[in-house]
């Protein structure tokens, strides 16, 4: 009986909804598992399925160590399937309507160790391109800028004598971000001795220029950094945003105030910044398990 209803539903998805074969196959796999569970529970009629039946099924998936993402997908499948049965008057009610969706798992961002970051920052050579790329990466790590903020920086946004940068962030917001004396020297060296070699149009105020004398795109910046990730032998899924994550994590690990880090990152909500405390706490737990004598 269940197979008949499932086949009707899959036919509906294909003909009425126009779903792809891959999507229909995914629905089919979910509903086959659901159907098998119902048979194992001696549930023989669809109109006898209750919300409790569905909760038991989802608990069964949890016991199989299915991820929250998988359970959310299954829950959506059940709601749509039972809604179809209700619309087709096969059942009177949709028992899946009041199911609570499990919270989405938030993956912690990838962060480099201080040693890994040091290797990465030392990987560019002393050519014009290498000096520029080193200055870019040093600034990303020193000030926690977003990639879009970095590539939109102009020379007029810098006050290196005072040690700060004027940043234009998301939603046309503005903030003042500090930078270190070390990085200020790197930027001064790049601007005075190397940027002119890349400059094709004197009217361009963009800080970091490509070999063609234009500002970087996000893809162009990532391409430039990707080479150094490979050269430094770091086996992590790194993106340009990894510099920002590492900046915040290293500050918090060394005792920085969470509100100050929030201000520097330009987060409107401190809960966004708090994810970096989770990374630090995770590292502390790992260190504790590794070194405590009574593990």
Image (cartoon, grey):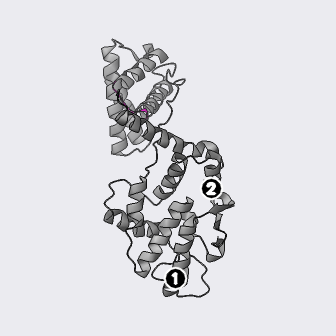
Q: What kind of secondary structure does the magenta stretch mostly adopt?
A: loop
Label 2 Cα crowd, 10 Å radius (few <14 / some 14-19 / many 20+): some
Residue at 50 percent of width and 20 percent of height: 95
Which residue range is magenta in the image?
64-68
Q: Which residue is mark 2?
A: 264
Q: Is residue 113 magenta?
A: no
Q: Disc 2 to disc 1, how far (Cα)? A: 27 Å
Q: Earlier in the sequence, mark 2 or mark 1?
A: 1
Q: Work out whether residue 128 can be spotted.
A: yes
Residue at 57% x, 42% y: name it.
Answer: 274
Q: Classify mark 2: helix, strand or loop.
A: helix
Which quadrant, please, contains the N terminus? top left
Task: Write the residue at 37% across / 25% down.
Answer: 61
Q: Is residue 1 visible?
A: no
Label 1: how many Cα within 10 Å (few below 14, some 14–19, many 20+): many
- Would residue 278 appear left or right of 29 to someone viewing this image? right
The C terminus sits in image quarter: top left
Q: Position of residue 152 (x, y in %)?
A: 58, 70
Query: From the viewer's perspective, is residue 135 above or below residue 229?
Result: below
Is residue 34 depicted above or below 125 in this figure?
above
Pick the front one: 287 or 41 = 287
**Residue tagged by mark 1?**
195
Whole-percent x, y for residue 224 in the image: 41, 70
């Amino acid at each position: 009986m269940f197979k008949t209803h499932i086949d009707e539903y899959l036919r509906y998805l294909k003909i009425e909804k126009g779903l792809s074969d891959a999507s229909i196959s995914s629905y089919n796999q979910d509903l086959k598992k659901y159907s098998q569970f119902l048979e194992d529970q001696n549930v023989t009629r669809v109109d006898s399925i209750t919300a409790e039946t569905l909760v038991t099924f989802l608990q069964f998936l949890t016991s199989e160590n299915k991820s929250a993402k998988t359970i959310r997908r299954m829950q959506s499948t059940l709601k749509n399937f039972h809604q179809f049965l209700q619309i087709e008057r096969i059942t009177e009610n949709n028992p899946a309507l009041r199911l609570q969706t499990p919270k989405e798992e938030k993956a912690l961002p990838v962060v480099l160790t201080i040693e890994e970051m040091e290797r990465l920052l030392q990987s560019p050579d002393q050519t014009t391109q290498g000096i520029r790329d080193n200055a870019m990466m040093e600034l990303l790590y020193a000030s926690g800028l977003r990639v879009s903020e970095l590539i939109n920086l102009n020379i007029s946004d810098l006050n290196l004598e005072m040690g700060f940068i004027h940043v234009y962030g998301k939603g046309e917001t503005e903030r003042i971000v500090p930078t270190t004396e070390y990085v200020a020297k790197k930027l001064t060296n790049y601007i005075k001795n190397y940027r002119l070699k890349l400059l094709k149009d004197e009217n361009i105020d963009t800080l970091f220029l490509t070999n063609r004398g234009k500002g970087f795109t996000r893809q162009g910046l990532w391409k430039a950094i990707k080479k150094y990730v490979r050269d430094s032998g770091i086996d992590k899924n790194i993106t340009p945003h990894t510099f920002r994550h590492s900046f915040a994590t290293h500050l918090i690990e060394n005792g920085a105030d969470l509100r100050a880090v929030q201000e520097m990152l330009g987060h409107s909500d401190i809960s966004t910044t708090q994810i970096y405390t989770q990374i630090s706490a995770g590292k502390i737990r790992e260190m504790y398990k590794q070194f405590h004598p009574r593990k």
